[in-house]
Image (cartoon, rainbow, N blue to C red):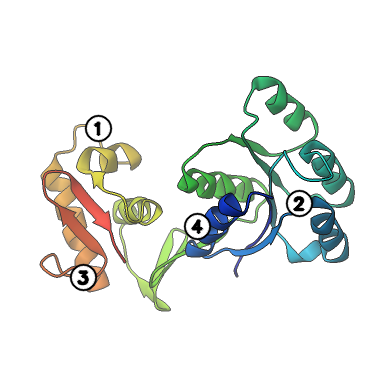
Amino acid sequence: MTKRVMLIEDDRAMQALISGYLTDYGYGVSSFGDPRSALEALKQHKEAFDIVILDLMLPGMDGFDAARTIKSVSDIPIIISSARGDIGNKIHGFELGVDDYLAKPYEPRELILRIEAVLRRYGNAPQLQVSDFTVDEQSRTVSMEGYPVDLTPVEFEIFLFLLKNRGNNVSREQIVHATSLEPETKGRTVDMHISNIRLKIGDSAKSPSYIKSVWGIGYRFIG
C-alpha cells in the first residue's frame, strides 16, 4: 500500500525536488506551501497521511507552532526539514515531539532513509517501489512486476543497497560495508553475487536494463 506524505514546504523549488524524489520511491505526496491549509487538511482527513515533512520557516506560522498543532490533533510522525540546523532548534523540535530533524542542505536519499526508519518505529514501514521492483524490508522479499524474486539474504541486502542508491555509482567496498558480508570479502565475491542477482531478474551484463557495471568503480542501478 502506498504511503502518503504531507509535505509542508513553501520554497517551490525545494518542494518540487522533495516531492519528485519521494514520488520516484513510490510515495504519494500532498504538498502545501501554506501551513494553515495543511493543518486544515490534516484535521479533516487524519487517516489520509502517514508522515509529515515540515519546514520551519513558513508564511504566517512558525514551523514549531505548526508541529505543536499537528501533535495536538494527531499522533502522525513528523520529520523537520529546515535550514535552521543549530542544536537549539533541534532540541526544541524534539521537545515538541518531532521524530527526526534534517538540516538543509542534505541528500534527498537521506530523507528517504529517515522516513523509512521513522515509519518502522511506528510499525508502518513502507514498501519500496523502484522501477519494476517492489521490496518489503520487513519480510525481506522482492517482487518484479508482481512476481517473487528468490534472493538469498546477502543478495537481498546488495540489491536493496543498489535500489536505494539508484542512479549513483557504488563501489564494491561500499557494498561490502553496507551489507552483512565480511569486511575482508574480495571484490570478485561481490561480482559473483551481482551475477546471481542479474540472472534472477533477467538482466544482462553486456546490455543491462537494471544493473550496470561501472569500470574501475563498481555498479549502478539504472532501472
Among numbered discs 3 and 2, the one appearing first in the sequence:
2
- Mark whose residue sits in front, 4 or 2: 4
Among numbered discs 1 and 3, the one appearing first in the sequence:
1
Q: Which residue is mark 3?
A: 203
Q: Residues within 10 Å of mark 3 (few under 14, many from 20)?
A: some
**What is the CA distance from the residue labelled 3 to the residue labelled 4?**
25 Å
What amino acid is at disc 1? Pro
Q: Which residue is mark 1?
A: 183
Q: Quadrant of the C terminus?
A: bottom left
Asked if marks 3 and 4 touch (Cβ < 8 Å), the reply is no
Among numbered discs 3 and 4, the one appearing first in the sequence:
4
- At which x and y percent is residue 130? 42, 65
Element class at badge 1: loop
Q: Which residue is mark 2?
A: 76
- Total marks in image: 4
Image-based side of 31 in relation to 152, left or right: right
What amino acid is at disc 2? Ile
- Mark whose residue sits in front, 4 or 1: 4
Q: Is residue 15 above or below residue 91?
A: below
Q: Quadrant of the N terminus?
A: bottom right
Image-based side of 195 in relation to 63, left or right: left
**What is the CA distance from the residue labelled 1 to the residue labelled 3?**
27 Å
Observer-nearest residue: 29 or 153?
29
At horizontal 88% and vertical 51% (from top left) the residue drawn is 73
Observer-nearest residue: 48 or 104?
104
**What is the CA distance from the residue labelled 4 to the residue labelled 2?**
21 Å
